[in-house]
Image: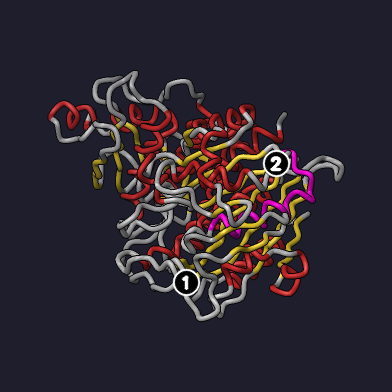
Amino acid sequence: MKTTLFTSTASSIDTPCLILAIFTDQAFSTSTAAVNEASSGLIEQLRESGDIQTAAGKTTLLHRVDGISARRVLLVGMGKPGELDAAKFSAACQSAGKQLRDLAFDTASSCLHEVKVKAQDSNWCLRQSIIAIGNANYFYTATKEPKPNGPKPLRQLGVVCAQDNQSNTAIQQAEAILSGYTRARALGDLPPNLCNPVYLAEQADEIAGRYPNCSSEALDTEQMQELGMHALLGVARGSRNPPRLIILRYSGADKDEKPVVLVGKGITFDTGGISIKPGENMDQMKYDMCGAAGVIGTFEACAHMQLPINLIVIVAAAENMPDGDAYRPGDVITSMSGQTIEVLNTDAEGRMVLCDALTYAKRFEPAALIDVATLTGACVVALGHHASGLMSKSDDLVAELVTAGNEIVDRAWRLPLWDEYQVQLDTPFADMKNIGGMPGGSITAGCFLSRFAKGQNWAHIDIAGSAWKWGTQEGATGRPVGLLSQFLINHSSK
C-alpha cells in the first residue's frame, strides 16, 4: 500500500472513501468539522440522533454526502474524549482497515491521525494510523484469486496533513514497517507444501537482491554437519524437505560497528515428530515458522528504511516429521556448542533448532542477540493472544524491547528467567533435557535457550500466542515485526 499526502481540505478531496474520526461527545477534528460544515451539519445531526456509532473501534459508512467530493465517508468511533490511548487508537484504525478491505475499491483517504492520543504526538498518530489501516487491510491471494467485483486491499491511502520533514519521515517509516508486516503475514499464511526451508531461503535471496547493502546465503545439510549442528539436523532428519540455515546481512553502518542479530525459528511444518500432535488444528502448524517470518519481515523493513545500523538475521529452517529416520524420545544429541541434549519430547523441536542457530550467531559478536519463536503453548495459556512473552537476564535490553513494543502497540510482557527454574532441565544422561515439565513451560524453554547464549546481550521472544490466533481463520498477524522494527529504529538513533 502506497501513501500519498494531501494538503487540501478534506471536503474537497475526490476519493472513493474519506475516513474520519468521531468522538462520543467532543468537538470534531479539523477534517470532520470541515465535512460537517460542508454537509450543513449532517455529521452532528447523525451523532445526536444516535445513527453514528461513536464507541472506540465502531464504524459507520455514509454514501453520497452532500457538499463534499468524496463518494463515501467512513466514520470511525474513538470513544470518550480523554480516554483514547495508543492501543485504543491503533485498534480503531484497524477497524477502519478491516472495513475497507471488504469494500470493492482500492483507494481511500484518511484523516484519523488528527485526533489527540494520550502521550503521543501528531507524527506518531500519522505513522500508527497508516500501519494499522494497512495491516488490517491485508488480503491473502497467494493460492486464491480474488473475485473480480469482490473485496480488495487498498492500493493507495491518502493522508491529509501538512508536508514537512517529520510527516515525510513518519510516512516513510510506516510504509517500511507495513512492508515488513505484509511479508511476514504472507510467508506465515502460505501452505506448508509451498513454504518449506528451501523456499524461505529463496525468499531471503529475493529480498536481499532488491535492496542495497544486503546479502543472503543459506547453509545446506553438509555445511551444517561440518559445523556440528546436530540439534538442528536431528529435527530435520524425519523430513524429505532439507533444512537450511539462512543468513541475511544488512550493512547500514560502519563495518566495525557491532550488529544486532535476530534469530528466527523456521519450522515450516510441525507434526510434533515421533511425539506426534493431535490431529485437531494440526493444519495450523504451518504457522510454526512465524518467528522466521517475523525476523525476515523486520529485515525487509530495516532495508526499506535504510537505517544506520548493521543487522544480521539468521533463520533456522526445518520441517519436523515422523519419518523412519526421525529423531526419537530418549536420543542424546550433541549440539554445535558441544553441550549434549537428552530428547524427551520431539515436539520441543523449536529450541533444538534455535540452540544451534544461537551458537552460530556468536561469531558475529552481536551488540544484541534476540531470538523469536512460536515456542510454547504454555505462553498462550499465560498471556493469551495480546502479548508476546519476553525473557532475558539483561534489564537494559528488556527495557528497550518493552518500550519499543509499547510505542508501536506490538507489546511484550516480561517473564522471569530465574536460575531456580534451570534445575527442571537436569538429567543424569546429558548436560540437559529438552523439556522441563509442565510447571513454567515457557520459562524453562527460555532457560534452555539461555544456556546457548551465555555471555551475550540476549533476549528471547515467545510469539506462540501473538503470531496467530489459535483455532481461528484470521491468519498470521506479522508480529513481532512492529516491535523489532521500532527497536531497530530506537537502537540506530542512540
Mark 2 or 1: the one toward you: 2
Q: CA distance from mark 2 to mark 1?
A: 34 Å
Image position, residue 408 (x, y; %):
50, 35
Image position, residue 335 (x, y; %):
67, 59
Residue at left offset 46%, top offset 36%: 409
Furthest-left residue in this view: 49
Q: Does the magenta-highlighted stretch encompass residue 439?
A: no
- Main SS of the magenta part reads helix
**Where is mark 1, residue-wise?**
192
Amino acid type assigned to the residue bearing label 1 in the image: Pro
Q: Is residue 344 above or below residue 7?
A: below
Which badge, 2 or 1, is on the more N-terminal residue?
A: 1
Residue at left offset 59%, top offset 57%: 429
Task: Give the residues in magenta.
Answer: 350-367
**Where is mark 2, residue-wise?**
454
Q: Is residue 251 above or below residue 149?
A: above
